[in-house]
Amino acid sequence: MEQNGFKVAVVGATGAVGNLMVKVLEERAFPVSELKLLASARSIGKTLGFKGRQIAVEELVEESFEGIQLALFSAGSAISRKFAPIAARSGAVVIDNSSAWRMDPQVPLVVPEVNPDAALSHSGIIANPNCSTIQMVVALKPIYDAVGITRIVVTTFQAVSGTGKRAIEELRTQVSDIMQGRETVRQIYPHQIAFNCFPHIGAFLENGFSEEEMKMVNETQKIFSDPEIRVCATTVRIPVIYVHSEAVNIETKKPVSPEQVRTLLQAASGVRVIDDPSSAGYPVPLDAAGTDDTFVGRIRRDPSVENGLAMWVVADNIRKGAATNAVQIAEVLLSRGRL
Ligand SMILES: NC(=O)c1ccc[n+]([C@@H]2O[C@H](COP(=O)([O-])OP(=O)(O)OC[C@H]3O[C@@H](n4cnc5c(N)ncnc54)[C@H](OP(=O)(O)O)[C@@H]3O)[C@@H](O)[C@H]2O)c1
């Protein structure tokens, strides 16, 4: 721990995202003088490693945030709705991974490669966008700035880690049961996820879209500060453990060639272009897992519309899509002297 560091709390530290937040704080050498690991009463007795020390997990209670300067939340919306204001009132800056505060006009929704300055206008809570939105806007921001984007049509291929640690277990157990000739058991998903996929992430709404699909619409408009940008999403769960992939199709305001887009993206922070299809050179989940970049490939002209482009965007959903993005927001605050 660093004497001149910050007192940091991770809420949901035993979960898929929270666990990784602890790792990412260490990997990126974020200055931490004290780390408080918070979860439910079920986790009392567990410890997690940080910088060579084992730290005991504590139960989250209203008093947990006394003296805390930075609180990273990833314990679901209900916990964030209740405890994020408590943490903020006690003086912490909250960076929240749940969807509880994302669309609140008082709460900035931040992707550091896209709208870092928005973080500075916070009143105690900053929201981390949905994982599928983050990787899409990171890939599209350089194009948006160069030629404008009027419409996005996106289909996602989302890993089970996006649903949390119990969903990872469900996929592993179902695969093992099938290989052993046993019946599969479903607890988390509406269908068997092993050797299957389904276009159903979050509840369905009256307009026929799922909650996940509408998050991609609303969050993209908020992050780009562009209520006019049209977005149509289809979100699909697939039997991959880590890393979301997206087939993204855009219409730009001005014409732009695939070569120009490759050049723009090669220069962009946080983006890696892998685009050599003739030698099977395109991003895939197994290569992106465990990394912090957003990978883009298969960049090509869409001949079905004027100014149309299609591409393939891949990123680790619990790193760039969650934990890394949250720590990067904290780094923005730190670098601007706002923590
Ligand atoms: N996974 C992703 O790709 C992703 C991406 C972006 C955002 N998010 C968001 O991040 C949040 C966590 O997701 P996850 O995937 O990490 O879920 P997860 O693996 O199920 O972990 C949930 C965490 O919340 C804690 N928790 C649950 N109930 C609690 C309570 N009553 N009091 C205190 N802690 C409690 C759990 O503690 P116990 O272990 O003690 O139960 C655990 O640490 C969700 O809001 C999710 O939408 C996830």
Image (cartoon, rainbow, N blue to C red):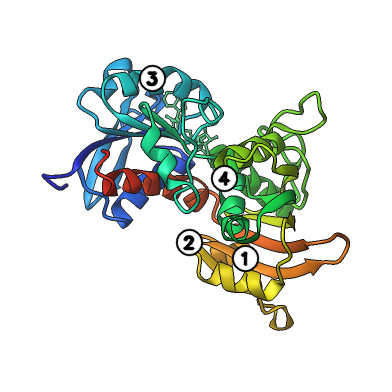
Q: Which quadrant holds residue 259?
A: bottom right
Which residue in the protein does label 1 denote?
296
How many callouts does the rendering have? 4
Q: Secondary structure at mark 2?
A: loop
Residue that protrudes farthest toward the bottom in the picture: 279
Q: Secondary structure at mark 1?
A: strand
* Residue at figure coordinates x 28%, y 22% from the top left: 64
Which residue in the protein does label 2 denote?
270
- Residue 4 in the figure: left or right of residue 321: left
In the rendered view, tell whether residue 303 sits above or below residue 137: below
Q: Nearer the viewer, mark 2 or mark 4?
A: 2
Local packing at callout 1 (Cα closer than 10 Å; few below 14, some 14-19, many 20+) is many
Given contact means CB atoms under 8 Å apart, are the residues at marks 1 and 4 in contact?
Answer: no
Mark 4 residue type: Cys
Which residue in the protein does label 3 denote?
85
Looking at marks 1 and 4 on the same chain, the residue that comes earlier in the sequence is marked by: 4
- Quarter holding the C terminus? top left
Which residue in the protein does label 4 denote?
131
* Label 1 to label 4: alpha-carbon separation: 16 Å
Looking at marks 3 and 2 on the same chain, the residue that comes earlier in the sequence is marked by: 3
> Where does residue 144 sit, x and y in percent of width and height?
62, 55
* Label 1 to label 3: alpha-carbon separation: 37 Å
Q: Secondary structure at mark 3?
A: helix
